[in-house]
Image (tube, grey):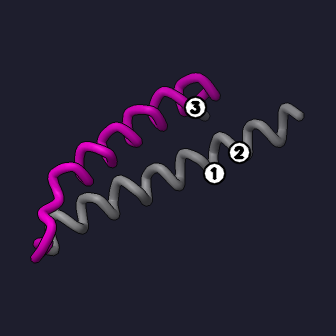
Amino acid sequence: MDSLEILEDRLKKIEKKIEEAKQHLPAHSIKPPVMMTLLDFEDERDAIMEKINSIRKKNA
């Protein structure tokens, strides 16, 4: 199982990727592959956040 520090580092990296992907989105006519990439990043972020919250609850 990943440690809290590793997960927090992964979270920062994926959030940076999300921001970069959003900056590259065109104002109109977003292509499906571009949107799918962003959604995949967001899904990964959500999964990491769930793991972090789970670890924090166990340590509380």
Q: Are marks 2 and 3 in contact (CB under 8 Å)?
A: no
Tag 2: residue type? Asn
Q: Are marks 2 and 1 in contact (CB under 8 Å)?
A: yes
Identify the residue at the far top of this view. 5
Q: Earlier in the sequence, mark 3 or mark 1?
A: 3
Q: Is residue 32 left or right of residue 16?
A: left
Q: Residue at x 26, y 54 (%)?
A: 22
Q: Residue at x 63, y 45 (%)?
A: 51
Q: Residues within 10 Å of mark 2 (few under 14, many from 20)?
A: few
**Which label number is shown at residue 50?**
1
Stretch of the chain drawn in magenta = 2-31
Residue 10 on the magenta segment: yes
Task: Tell me the residue that label 3 is attached to.
Answer: 2
Identify the residue at the far right of this view. 60
Q: How many marks?
A: 3
Q: Earlier in the sequence, mark 2 or mark 3?
A: 3
- Residue 31 in the image: state x and y as whole percent: 11, 72
